[in-house]
Image: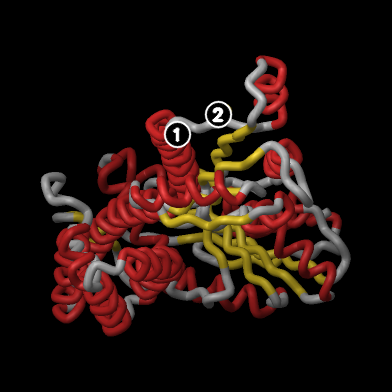
Amino acid sequence: MDRDTPAFDLERALAMVEGDGDLLVATAQRFLEQNPARLHEMRDALERRDLSEIERLAHGLAGAAQNFVALDTERAARALMERSAAGDIPAIRTLLERAEAALSDLGDALAAHCTRHELRNVLVADDDDVTRMRLEHLLTKWGHRVTSVSRGDVALEILGPSGPPHLAIVDWMMPGMTGIDVCRALRARKSDTYTYVILITARDDPDSMLAGLEAGADDFLAKPIAPEELRARLRAGQRIVELQERLIAAREEQRRHADRDGLTGVSSRRRIFEVLDTALSEGAASDNELTVAMIDLDDFKRINDEHGHIAGDRALREACERMQRQLRRTDTFGRYGGDEFIAVLPETNLREGAEIAQRMCDALAASPVECGDLSLPLRVSVGVASVQGSLCEREQILKWADRALFRAKAAGGNQVVKADPESADAS
């Protein structure tokens, strides 16, 4: 990543749409909506070693990045295309991480631009035509796009829970709904986005100001409104809403990282438990079977002890890649802890689950992991358990699978054992 290169070139990007800021924002928002699916498809293609699919997706990313003159993202995508064509899996893995990082920076920059652009949309709600006309004139002169209404209930409807405008100038007394009621209704909503409200009124006493602030107004201006004072208040509001947007973006990034295991890139323990809980609930509602595979690498501690943790980490990542390639798109694979993993296999009976688990065993045993001069053989033991229809707790099905795994390990490893919930062994 070249930190001296901006995530995207706003001036050139605007020139590409002939200065149409609204069109740039619309395309940026569509691009941001597509990013999660794009990254998921790339990771999935890498797990399957589908090089032509990776090349296709990277080609699409390079083209999309050109719309914003996002040089770092475009370079990463083009490098990914070249390595995919060459079949260089290790390089592809590294380049995919680089592309994700570049795309994350670009996403943050585009989201910030979209927010700033949206903040230039201001709602004016005042039933006095003269005041409303004066505010419209000032705001338009300052570069804002103005939506103007004369009723409080209409203002609340326009101030939707997700879209712009995020800045509003609202009169205290209006038909349909007072400005105080608009503030209360906005603050009662459960929404991540924040609307900054400046309440205006002919009242200038401290009690009125206090009542407005307690109702949820962010600022208070007395009529007649001084233009420069209004402009300063709007700038303060823009800074606050931009800060709110950055906090939301940071929280989403933190959540994304929490869903992935840092070493292997597979689903984290927290995420795999969420998937399992959902699958159990859906299975109970639909009467479909669900199978869980508990997986443990055989003698993995010996690799760490004899060859060090770098070799052990490489072996873990390779093991995950091989096992995930045996799964279907509907399955979820995650790290339970250490060298133990879980696969959640929805709409799968015990026999089918055991067959999938056996494919994972065979994939690992087929060839050793190459790590520099080392050739490390890998074996895995799997316990599978299933449930159908009746609501089952996560702890119960995991206990069944874990006991089956224990039997597989006790029998020498490198095999699959099916649990029998009807037996005392699995109870």
- Regarding residue 312, the answer to whether it shows in the image is yes
Q: Position of residue 135 (x, y in %)?
A: 48, 46
Q: Position of residue 100 (x, y in %)?
A: 30, 58
Secondary structure beneath label 2: strand
Q: Position of residue 215 (x, y in %)?
A: 71, 30
Q: Amino acid at mark 1?
A: Leu
Find out whether the residues at labels 1 and 2 contact each other: C-beta distance under 8 Å. Answer: yes
Q: Position of residue 352 (x, y in %)?
A: 65, 79
Which quadrant would residue 145 be assigned to in this image? bottom left
**Residue at coordinates 14% horizontally, 78% vertically from top-left?**
86
Q: Report the front residue among 265 and 225.
A: 225
Numbered label attached to residue 221? 2
Numbered label attached to residue 230? 1
**Residue at coordinates 68% horizontally, 78% vertically from top-left?**
351
Q: Report the front residue among 407 and 212.
A: 212
Where 197 falls versus 399 (above or below)? Answer: above
Where 363 falls versus 36 (above or below)? Answer: below
Q: Report the front residue among 182 and 351.
A: 182
Q: Amino acid at mark 2?
A: Leu
- Regarding residue 322, the answer to whether it shows in the image is no
Q: Earlier in the sequence, mark 1 or mark 2?
A: 2
Disc 1 and disc 2: Cα gap in Å?
8 Å
**Residue at coordinates 37% horizontally, 44% vertically from top-left?**
302
> Coloring scheme of the render?
secondary structure
